[in-house]
Image (spheres, grey):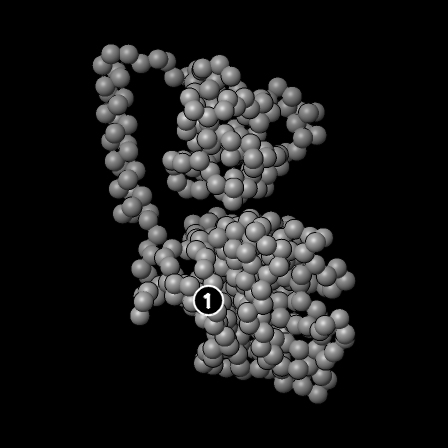
Amino acid sequence: MRGDEYSVFVLLFKEACAKCFGTPLTKPLTEPESRRLSDVILEQSGLVVGWKSLKNYSVFVLDRKSAREENPSIATLDTLARYVLNAPKSDEAARQNQDQHFPFWFQYRQARHEGSPPATGRRWLFIAASLMLACLIFVVLRFFVFAPRTAETFEEDFHSLNDDSLALRGWGVSHKDGDAWSRRDASPGHLTLYTLQGDNWPDSNHAPDVRNLLYRKLSGECFAVEAHLLHFVPKANWEQAGLLLMEDTAFAGKSVRFSIAFNNYLGGFPGPGEIHLQAITCQGKQSEKPEEVVHTTVFTMNNETDKLVEENLKYTALRIEKEGKVLRFLYSAGPMENAAFKEVGRHEFSFEPRYVALVALRGFVKDTTSIPAVFSLFRVVPMPCGS
């Protein structure tokens, strides 16, 4: 890569990282961050840049002298430019047929490089002063205007569900299922997710995969998160909805899921259906076996009790409280909205969740129809540590 192309590549890569993560690139990307960037680029552009390449590029961009020489292909440069320039979604076949000349890379290069004549003398002083002023303004805006209010409660009633509105309120969505995501407003004024096939619980045949993962960033070591559901009555194996705490959105790190679920296949033998509360901890890629730390039966299902169960699950709420290593799991349900929370378990688990997500899933079961999980409220409440 020539010197002039390298400078434009550095600008392009840093701009892609800033667009994805909302902050400037100051240190090499971690594996979860690289995977996240790769997923976002694929989701928006329809084209692939491998996460390992992105991780290597971040090292090279920040320290060209010490890092191994990287020489991204023009196709990769074009894909990064497509992402940064918000180009229409494509795929490799369409690019081969219509865009063999890689127009977005050359458009970006011209705008960022060829359109910027070299600066000398006093103009350098002016540019340096302007850059210092811009950095100062950025710091003020970043930390005093746009910084997340970590000391305040965040509450979401899902009054608006278009993608731009959700993003402005701090939400992201990954692994979209187009059909199910398009029906997220099926219950006006609420968020509707569907129990799609997938799970963050890995097994020997499936990698972790949760469709329509709606997540937001967390700050602080001590907090409570809660989700409120309307009329959610799971009736098929592993149908469930609830909360997921994660170290990253690619499931490479540790996670905790707390959900209300159905099961009638215990120990390999068919049994009476039960609706239960389940909390599981996952060590991420370090371990293939999650640990079930809470399993509490709420209702045993039969024809005589079905109507009563549905009435008592008219309003359901799940809450996870985290204070240092201690996790506390609470549950509320009833025909009235203001039923009290009850503790169903607690567990010590050392991890640092950076994200919380709302999930609806059914594991990797194929022969079950998806049902809606209607979320009416989500809340994050900061808590004092060491109280």
Q: Position of residue 241 (x, y in %)?
A: 58, 66
In the image, 154 versus 35, the foreground residue is 35
Q: Position of residue 106 (x, y in %)?
A: 53, 20
In the image, 266 versus 115, the foreground residue is 266
Residue 160 visible to an observer of this rendering: no
Q: Note whether 179 is above or below 105 in the view shown.
A: below
127 sits to left or right of 294: left
The residue that appears at 44% across and 53% down in the rendered structure is 354
Q: Note whether 363 is above or below 30 in the view shown.
A: below
Q: Which residue is mark 1?
A: 348
Q: Position of residue 49 (x, y in %)?
A: 58, 33
The residue that appears at 64% across and 24% down in the rendered structure is 99
The residue that appears at 52% across and 51% down in the rendered structure is 253
Q: Quadrant of residue 294?
A: bottom right
Q: Quadrant of residue 268?
A: bottom right
In the image, 208 versus 331, the foreground residue is 208
